[in-house]
């Protein structure tokens, strides 16, 4: 698993500083880490692991094809082969109409935008039955002991190579200390799950080479990136922290809620 460091910034909770942060991956700083690969099974509430794994595998295969078509259309457009780009565009449209998960995701998005909330509820319930993983957002927000962690991920098409099974995602982390005590981020732990069910546990000291101390009512923000071997997946984890205003204070874990890595996105 390769993580690519990007920008980092401290911000004052009461000011506007640090509101914007680029998610365009830096190509200057790259850290390679050895990860332990473990098996990961998906099961629904009835414990039907086989059916869920088959759905995940099928969806991963179809979204791989979808990503290839999108990349081919971009190449055709850049080379000014507009006839070929139009042909691939029409193929993509047909693919979206025939692929049940993509079709339902698009219908749900359109229903919410048009305020057809009864239809939106129907599409959401259908997705829950067909592919519950597709409902996970590309963002998450969790607070532990007054420390809030917000995450947002995006697909970086220019850095991805679907034909080689390489999909590149950037994500931004915003940590806000809403407690009354200063905290220090000591270690990180990520669980990265690919759409084929493979799971990777990643541990490390600090983030992007730092162990920041975050004062009360201030924050720390950085962005990084993660490659996948499938067109979608998930990330979740935790930060190990400690209070710095008392010697020998015990450490505690701050949750990073699950969020999606997806070529489709949820905008």
Image: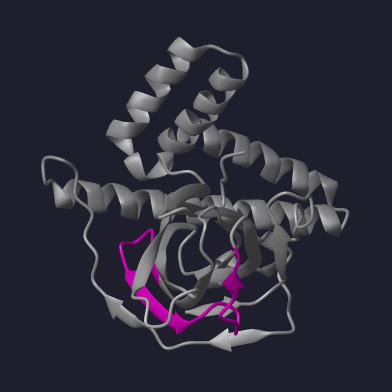
**Left or right: 174 in relation to 204:** right
| Residue 166 visible at all | no
| Residue 124 visible at all | yes
**Left or right: 243 in relation to 210:** left
Name the residue at 84% across, 57% down.
78
Q: Quadrant of residue 239?
A: bottom left
Residue 213 in magenta?
A: yes
Q: Which residues are magenta?
A: 190-215
Name the residue at 64% across, 66% down.
223
Q: Position of residue 136 (x, y in %)?
A: 43, 44
**Left or right: 148 in relation to 257:** right
Residue 33 in magenta?
A: no
Q: Residue furthest right?
A: 80
Q: Position of residue 43 (x, y in %)?
A: 19, 50
Q: Position of residue 22 (x, y in %)?
A: 75, 61
Name the residue at 55% across, 50% down.
66
Q: Quadrant of residue 124?
A: top left
């Amino acid at each position: 698993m390769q993580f690519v460091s990007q920008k980092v910034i401290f911000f004052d909770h009461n000011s506007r500083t640090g509101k914007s942060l680029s998610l365009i991956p830096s190509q200057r700083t790259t850290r390679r880490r050895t990860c332990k690969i473990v098996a990961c099974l998906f099961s629904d509430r009835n414990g039907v692991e086989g059916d869920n794994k088959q759905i995940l595998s099928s969806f991963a295969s179809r979204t791989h094809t979808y990503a290839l078509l999108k990349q081919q259309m971009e190449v055709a457009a850049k080379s000014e082969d507009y006839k070929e780009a139009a042909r691939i565009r029409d193929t993509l449209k047909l693919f979206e109409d025939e692929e049940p998960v993509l079709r339902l995701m698009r219908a749900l998005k359109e229903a919410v935008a048009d305020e057809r909330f009864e239809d939106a509820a129907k599409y959401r319930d259908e997705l829950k039955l067909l592919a519950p993983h597709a409902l996970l957002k590309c963002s998450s927000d969790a607070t532990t002991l007054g420390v809030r962690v917000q995450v947002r991920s995006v697909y970086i098409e220019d850095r991805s190579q679907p034909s080689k099974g390489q999909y590149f995602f950037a994500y931004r982390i915003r940590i806000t200390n809403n407690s009354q005590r200063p905290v220090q981020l000591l270690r990180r732990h990520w669980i990265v799950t690919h759409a084929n069910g493979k799971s990777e546990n990643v541990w490390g000291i600090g983030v992007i080479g730092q162990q920041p101390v975050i004062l009360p009512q201030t924050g720390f923000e950085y962005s990084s990136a993660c490659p996948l071997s499938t067109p979608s997946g998930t990330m979740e984890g935790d930060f190990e922290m400690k209070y710095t205003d008392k010697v020998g204070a015990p450490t505690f874990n701050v949750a990073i809620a699950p969020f999606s890595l997806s070529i489709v996105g949820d905008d």
